[in-house]
Image (cartoon, rainbow, N blue to C red):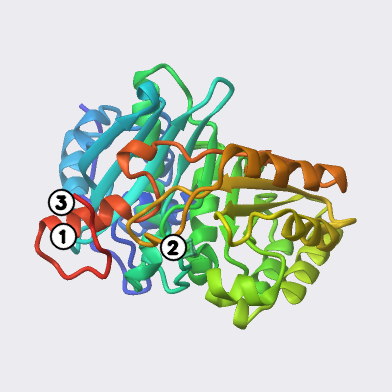
């Protein structure tokens, strides 16, 4: 029989974390120690939560039965419950909708590529940035997600990848929300998924995508984690960009690109610019040339994303393949590397915020998004 003393009550100094997925390994060691348990129990918990991807303490057979029962009562492993799953692209795109403990909805997308398996994680419920082409932005910000709620999205995706004998290799924080408005929890999330004792996803395989919060680009450059930075640019001029990304009024294009140049100088790492191509708005050759001029000399790559029509912006259209190719060719002509990336899962409402808006409407909740049926 294993030697086991019941969990002692926590001392008053312990920080509140709601689920196992909220804890870094060091914090978990403190948590178990405060409850009178040996610190190695934390490593066992971490191993089972992230190497074995277990979502039920009962499966952690290395732990004494009494401890498993007490943990189940004291500290749920995850705060998310999957309530919907849609599959597209012959199974290569899987979109999840999760319900949080306080009855909100979170979207996550898992994408299988020949050479990698990527999960796109949400960091907020709703978003305050309000990009004009985005369903999530229309609903405003409800709240930040905790690190644990972000980690849970990764664990769920990793479990589904495992069913296909694939290992989750990449994490992009490009779902609902602006990561730099939830900076501390996002960095805690990075620490947890990066930990070699757990999921062990290399920092260079983790991408944070911002709409352009300049002070945090400088802050990220100082972090010990070598995560990748993506910036949603969408336009080279202030007039146009302010129309698409209202945050531009606070941090205009010139300031944003200057911050990106500082970031590259400090880290030596390339910046990825995301550029949604919208017909007749930001997709002409003159705009491409202006973009190229502004990015000249900056270590970067441009991802051109043909607009994926959503009910959020019914007047916006996707450009023709010829216009898309011309835009890309102009960038290439000026020496700016660019790739056209089509959104995955168009037929399953994979655009950011759509599935959540549908669920809110289904439940008769007020939503600012007109949902197509
Ligand atoms: S595109 Fe991103 S930053 Fe813009 S509103 Fe949508 S979630 Fe927020």
CB at disc 2 and ligand 1 closer than 8 Å: yes
Of residues 166 and 351, the one drawn nearer to the viewer in this rendering? 351
Q: Residues within 10 Å of mark 2 (few under 14, many from 20)?
A: many
Percent across and percent down for residue 277 are 58, 52
Farthest-out residue, right = 297
- Horizontal arrangement in the rendering, residue 213 relative to residue 24 (left or right): right
Q: Which residue is mark 2?
A: 177
Instruction: Please state which of the two labelled residues, at mark 3 or mark 1, is closer to the viewer.
Output: 1
- Horizontal arrangement in the rendering, residue 176 relative to residue 234 (left or right): left
- Horizontal arrangement in the rendering, residue 144 relative to residue 214 (left or right): left
**Residue at disc 2, secondary structure:** loop
- Quarter of the picture containing the N terminus is top left
Query: Mark 2 touching mark 1, by CB under 8 A?
Result: no
Percent across and percent down for residue 133 are 45, 62
Determine if residue 256 is in view: yes
Q: Residues within 10 Å of mark 3 (few under 14, many from 20)?
A: few
Q: Which residue is mark 1?
A: 361
Percent across and percent down for residue 48 are 36, 33
Q: Label 3, label 2: how many angstroms apart (C-alpha)?
A: 31 Å
* Disc with the residue nearer the chain's start (2 vs 1): 2
Which mark, residue 73?
A: 3
């Amino acid at each position: 029989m294993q030697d086991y003393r019941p969990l002692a009550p926590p001392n008053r100094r312990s920080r509140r974390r709601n689920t196992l997925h909220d804890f870094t390994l060091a914090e978990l060691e403190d948590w178990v120690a405060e409850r009178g348990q040996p610190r190695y129990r934390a490593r066992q918990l971490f191993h089972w939560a992230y190497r074995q991807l277990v979502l039920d303490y009962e499966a952690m057979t290395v732990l004494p039965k009494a401890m498993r029962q007490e943990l189940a009562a004291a500290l749920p492993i995850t705060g998310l419950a999957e309530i919907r799953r849609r599959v597209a692209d012959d199974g290569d795109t899987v979109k999840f909708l999760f319900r949080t403990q306080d009855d909100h909805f979170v979207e996550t997308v898992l994408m299988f590529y020949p050479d990698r398996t990527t999960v796109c994680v949400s960091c907020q419920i709703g978003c305050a940035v309000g990009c004009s082409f985005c369903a999530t932005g229309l609903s405003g910000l409800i709240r930040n997600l905790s690190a644990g709620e972000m980690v849970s999205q990764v664990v769920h995706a990793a479990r589904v990848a495992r069913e296909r004998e694939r290992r989750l290799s990449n994490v992009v924080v490009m779902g609902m929300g602006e990561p730099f408005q939830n900076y501390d929890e996002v960095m805690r999330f990075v620490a947890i998924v990066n930990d070699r004792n757990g999921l062990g996803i290399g920092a260079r395989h983790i991408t944070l995508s911002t709409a352009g919060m300049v002070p945090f680009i400088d802050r990220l450059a100082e972090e010990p984690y070598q995560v990748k930075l993506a910036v949603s640019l969408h336009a080279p001029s202030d007039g146009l960009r302010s129309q698409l990304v209202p945050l531009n009024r606070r941090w205009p294009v010139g300031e944003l690109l200057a911050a990106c140049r500082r970031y590259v100088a400090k880290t030596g790492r390339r910046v990825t610019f995301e550029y949604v191509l919208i017909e007749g708005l930001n997709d002409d050759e003159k705009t491409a040339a202006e973009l190229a001029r502004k990015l000249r000399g900056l270590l970067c790559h441009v991802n051109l994303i043909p607009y994926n029509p959503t009910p959020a912006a019914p007047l916006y259209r996707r450009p023709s393949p010829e216009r898309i190719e011309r835009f890309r060719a102009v960038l290439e002509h000026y020496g700016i590397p660019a790739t056209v990336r089509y959104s995955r899962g168009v037929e399953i409402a994979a655009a950011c915020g759509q599935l959540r808006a549908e669920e809110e409407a289904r439940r008769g909740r007020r939503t600012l998004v007109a949902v197509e049926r």
